[in-house]
Structure formats: C-alpha cells, structure tokens
Amino acid sequence: MPSYEVILTKSALKTYVRLTVKLRKGVDRCIGYLEVNPTWGPNVKRLAGESGCYRHQVGGWRILL
C-alpha cells in the first residue's frame, strides 16, 4: 500500500511522455519504489553535500528527490 504520493512537475511530465517504452517502464517501476519508501531501493544514493536529498538512477536518467 503506497504511503507517499509521487507528483511530476510539468516539465518532468513532458519528458516522461517522450521516453521510450523500455525507459518508461523503468521509470514506472522507480515511481512504485518511491511510493513505498523514497530512500530505499535499487540504484538509490544520497546526494553529497545535500541534507535529505536522494537520487534514483533509471538507465542514464536520474530522478531527484
């Protein structure tokens, strides 16, 4: 059961729509992880020098929190 809500910015949504099908599936999976626990999952790293900021890597793309 999701405990967080993922909201894409307008520019992120425009980019998401233009992704290839394969990459979009990876982003969808990442969003599923984010809804459960945004600080845990495959390809998650804390950003250096930033308190409470993380990034999730999907293919060559990075999703920043």
Image (tube, rainbow, N blue to C red):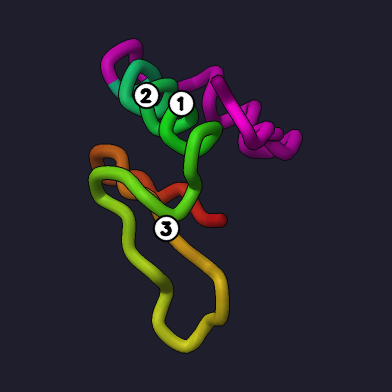
Q: Is residue 61 magenta?
A: no
Q: CA distance from mark 1 to mark 3?
A: 15 Å
| Residue named by callout 3 | 55
In the displayed structure, would residue 6 be above or below residue 39? above
In the displayed structure, would residue 54 be above or below residue 29? below
| Residue named by callout 1 | 32
- The residue drawn where x is 68% and y is 32% is 5
Looking at the image, is mark 1 or mark 3 earlier in the sequence?
A: 1
| Residue named by callout 2 | 29
Task: Between residue 6 and residue 26, name the one nearer to us.
Answer: 6
Instruction: Pinpoint residue 52: horizontal percent, then vertical percent.
Output: 56, 72
Relative horizontal placement of residue 34, taking residue 44 as reference (left or right): right
Q: CA distance from mark 2 to mark 1?
A: 5 Å
Q: Residues within 10 Å of mark 3 (few under 14, many from 20)?
A: some
Instruction: Pinpoint residue 33: horizontal percent, then vertical percent.
Output: 42, 33
- The residue drawn where x is 50% and y is 34% is 36
SS of the residue under disc 3: strand
